[in-house]
Each structure stands twice: as C-alpha cells, then as structure tokens.
Image (tube, rainbow, N blue to C red):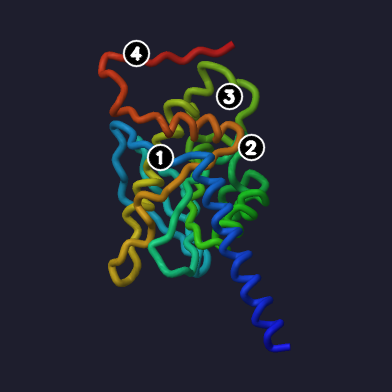
Amino acid sequence: MHLLKLINMKNEIKMVKLLRSIVLSMLMLIAIGCSDDQNNELGSDNEVVSLDAQNSIVRLTVDDVEIPVYLSIPDCEGPVPAVVVLHGSNGMWRDNDPNSQEMSGQFVEWRDLLLNNCIAAAFVDSYSPRGVTTRTGDLRTLPKNTIISAQFVRPKDANTALEHLRLLKDSNGKKMIQEGNISVLGFSDGASAAVSTLIDLSKVPSDFVWTLSSN
C-alpha cells in the first residue's frame, strides 16, 4: 500500500512538471519575448493597489498616460518566468468596469493557470486610460482607431510592462523575474499588438517611413 502511494506521488509530480513544461513551451512558441521600443521610458509608479498576496494593480506612465497593469506574482522560489498579456477588442475588465479591479473571466483563468505553474504575468489595460471601453464602431477604422493603435500605441504599453517586470525585486533586493524569459501573449486586437511588439526597432533603418492604412 505504501509503495502504491509512493508511485502515485511520483506520477503526480511528473504530471505537474510536464504541465509546466507544456505551458512554458506554448507561451514561448506564441512569442519569444518583447522587443525594446524607442522613445519609451518607464514612468514612476503613481499608485499601487494591493489586491492580495499575489495580485496587485500598478499604474505605469506611457506618453503621459497612466496605464493600469494587473500584476500576478506566484508564490514560488524565484526568479520566475513571466508573460505580458494584451487584451482583445472587448477590453480587460469584468463588465468593462476598470473600477471593479476585477479582470474578465478569461483573464482570471489565464492568471490562475500561470500562477499555478510558477509564471508571473502583467495584464496590460490599453483601453480605459484612453477613454475606450471596447473597440467598436469608429474605433475599428482610421483615423479614430489611432488612439489605441495595435501597431504604434499598444507596443509601448507592452514594453513598459516588460521593463517593470524586469525591475521587480523582493524584500531582499533579489530580482523576482527571469530577465531573459519574458513572453508576450495577445488575444484578438491584442494579438496584433503582440506581433507589433516583437518588431525590434533598433534594426529598422532610421530613414524608414511608417504608414498606416485601412480598408
């Protein structure tokens, strides 16, 4: 009977390790990491709202706009991997209410999945600080959609969240995040933003002219 319990425990440990490996591999396939963005400085944190031991909301400054970022940090021996998560066209918050401080169901599921596998996450709200609830109507076409552009605006938010993750330290001054192991994950409009975030602007010729078109 004791031998059977021991075998079952070993199998459970193997399954946990396998699940963590699969999740990490999946995320790294989605995106290897965030690129550095030009003209993008990490603003001082204006407000940090602690939700519980693992979750908090921090406001980071991007081009004079305070961007809410929902941070979830696993209670695991660090430093740990991390993911920058970019929401889709329906925004990030439950019932589209950023004041609720509650994310919508799908992001709660992702948060819990990542936490359970010792992966930190930064969920970035690019809409509400710019007066947008959902990307509908005129916000889907030029010129109105430029205020939340997945190509030119949201990558700055993602890179600012990335830099914040890189700088996180615990009470002993030890880095909490594996600097070379931060991915980006996006949904719908956030997927377009994730692809744009991966562009390494340092490799783009200085005389390159960016254009934005829509049909």
The first of marks 1 and 4 along the sequence is: 1
Q: Residue at x 60, y 67 (%)?
A: 14
Amino acid at dot 2: Asn
**Foreground: disc 1 or disc 3:** 1
Q: Residues within 10 Å of mark 4 (few under 14, many from 20)?
A: few
Residue at the disc numbered 3? 139
Residue at the disc numbered 4? 209
Residue at the disc numbered 2? 90
Q: Relative to the observer, which residue lies in front, 46 or 196?
A: 196
How far apart are the two marked residues, 3 and 2, measured between alpha carbons?
12 Å
How far apart are the two marked residues, 2 and 4, measured between alpha carbons?
31 Å
Amino acid at dot 3: Leu
| x then y, percent, for residue 148 | 50, 29
Q: Residue at x 60, y 57 (%)?
A: 113
Q: Tag 3's secondary structure?
A: helix
The first of marks 1 and 3 along the sequence is: 1
The first of marks 1 and 2 along the sequence is: 1
Q: Relative to the observer, which residue lies in front, 28 or 145?
A: 28
**Quarter that holds the N terminus:** bottom right
Above or below: residue 173 compared with residue 160: below
Say which mark, if any, is on residue 34.
Answer: 1
**Foreground: disc 3 or disc 2:** 2
As drawn, the residue found furthest toward the left would be 206
The first of marks 3 and 2 along the sequence is: 2
As drawn, the residue found furthest toward the bottom would be 2
